[in-house]
Image (tube, rainbow, N blue to C red):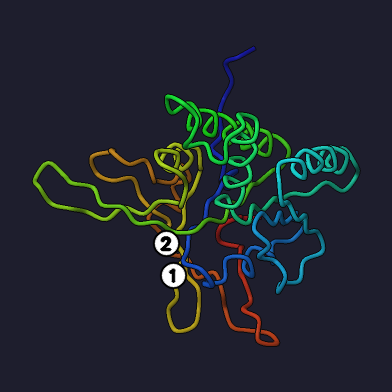
Amino acid sequence: MLIKEQSPSKNPRTTVLMGLPKIGKTTIAAQLDNSLLIDFERGTEFVTHPSVASVTNYADLRVLFKEIMEKQKGSNPYKYCIWDTVTGLEMHLNRHIAGEHGVSSIEEIAYGAGYGALRSKLMSVLDWFTNQFDHLVVLGHLKKRFIERTNGKLDTEFEIELTGKLAPIFMSQMDSIGLLFREKKEVFCKFLEASEDDEVIIGSRVSRLDGNVLQLTKGRKDGVPIADWSEIFLT
C-alpha cells in the first residue's frame, strides 16, 4: 500500500556544514558519538576519534564500501557518517574519471562530458552513503558567489566549494545547510534559508533549523573545544 500517514522527521538525514579553513569543522564533527569519520584530505591527524577511514584515491573508496557494508550488517552499526571534506572526495572522483579517459583532468574530456560524469559519480556516491547510515554529515570549504538580482543589486550567496555548477546541485540534495562562524572563541552555525526568489536552493527541509543560529561549541577541555550536537540531532 503506497498511501499512508506521514509524520515529519525531526532530524536531518543529510547535513552540510561549510566554513573557512581551521575554523574547527573536523574537531566539532569528531565529537559525534557512534560515527565513522572519513578523511578525504588528510585533515584528521590532530583529532581523536575511534573510527577514522583515510581515503586517498578511488581504489580506497571501493575498499571502504565493502568494509562499511560489513559493519552496518553487524550488531553495532554506525549511526553517523562524516565526510571530511566533500571537496576532497570530489578531487578523488575527478582523478578517477580523468584516468579512465587517459587525461590529467576532467576539463580535458571533450564536449564537457567530464563534468557530467563527475556529477553523476558524486550523486551516486551520495546516494550510497545515505542508504547506509541514519545521518550523513558533510564538511566542506566555504565559497562565496555573487548573484545579480532583477533590480541590478549584487547579493552574496554561500556555496560549498565544488566544481562549476555542481555546488548548487549537491546542496539541493541536503536536508540542512549550515554556515560556521566564530564569535568570542566559540563556533556557531547559521542554517541558511532559501533566497526569496528561490533562484538558489539553500534552505533546510527541517523547519526548526531553517534560518536559526545554534551554538556548536561551549567551552574547552584540555584546550579542545567542546561540541554540542544536541540541538541539531534531537534524541
Name which residue lies at 61% across and 37% down. 126
In the rendered image, which residue does mark 2 sit on? 190
Q: From the viewer's perspective, tell me whether residue 71 is left or right of residue 61.
A: right
Q: Secondary structure at mark 2?
A: strand
- Quadrant in the rendering for residue 211: bottom left
- Foreground: 2 or 213? 213
The residue at the far bottom in this view is 222
Task: Give above or below for 231 relative to 126.
Answer: below
Name which residue lies at 48% across and 40% down. 170
Cβ atoms under marks 1 and 2 closer than 8 Å: yes
In the rendered image, which residue does mark 1 sit on? 181
- Foreground: 192 or 231? 192
| Mark 1 crowd level (few <14, some 14–19, many ≥20, 10 Å Cα) | some
The amino acid on which the numbered mark 1 sits, given as a three-letter code, is Phe
Residue 23 position, x and y percent, is 52, 72
Name which residue lies at 76% across and 71% down. 48
Instruction: Count the labels in the image.
Output: 2
The amino acid on which the numbered mark 2 sits, given as a three-letter code, is Lys
The residue at the far top in this view is 1
